[in-house]
Amino acid sequence: MSDAIPFRPIGRIHTDFPAKFGVPRQSAPDSALTGRIVFEPEYRVPEAFRGLEDFSHIWVLWLFSESLREGWSPTVRPPRLGGNRRFGVFATRSPYRPNPIALSCLKLEAVDTNARDGPVLCVSGIDMQNGTPVLDIKPYLPYADSRPDACGGFSEQVKEKRLTVDFPSALLNGLAPDKRDGALEFLAQDPRPGYHDDPARVYRIAYAGKDIHFTVAGNVLTVTGITEIHNDR
């Protein structure tokens, strides 16, 4: 009997993040960050989605396609904890794992059966890079999946960490109106690695067709510029 387990993507998610830097580390409730899950032609069968529109949220299993590497390490350094403390890989959601599979709970905004490449799932709360391969979709079941008394382990130390975002209106207006709340959302989550602490350093995140430039001093993130993304990126 072969140990090989065949998997292939059923589709891809399209988001406003063309690169890994800046992508939220976790999906979030009440998020303004949206995406579209477009399926491969063989799975664009309306019957496969029958009843899904009655659910408010879905589980999306996807592939860490930009983090593939040979081998694996039993411990990793979570960046949100400063990158200098090691934990077991199975106690983290690190992309560097024996099988690079990720899991996100997303809000299902709509099932668009009229799209040219439909059915398409319109979702919010995304934490994926544009083009990420999707392996499976399952409905979120509140009675089975919600555990209000669950303990979050070491993640409890950083779950409330947020920055104050100073995004001058003259720069914020450089984003499309429906992308502004999403930008404020992921910037407040502090996209930098936890071990970065250089107030003079200018960071750049590609989002929704723009490059957002910013610095961080203390607990304040200041947007310093916004430019068009160059075609060579």
Image (cartoon, grey):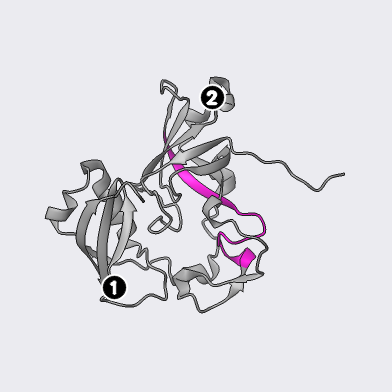
- Residue named by callout 1: 201
Q: Secondary structure at mark 1?
A: loop
Give the number of the disc on residue 166: none
- Judge the density around disc 1: few (<14), some (14-19), many (≥20) Cα neighbours within 10 Å: few
Residue at the location (64% across, 64% down)? 90
- The front one of 229 and 89 is 229
Question: How many numbered callouts?
Answer: 2
Left or right of 5: which side holds 22? Answer: left
Q: Is residue 141 visible?
A: no
Amino acid type, label 2: Arg
Q: CA distance from mark 1 to mark 2?
A: 46 Å
Amino acid on which the number 1 mark rests in the picture: Arg
**164 to 39, vertically: above or below:** below
The reply to whether the magenta stretch includes residue 96 is: yes
Percent x, y for residue 168?
Answer: 15, 59
Residue lying farthest right?
1
Tell me the residue that label 2 is attached to.
44
Q: Which residues are magenta?
A: 89-109
Q: Check if residue 19 falls in the magenta segment.
A: no
Looking at the figure, which quarter contains the N terminus?
top right
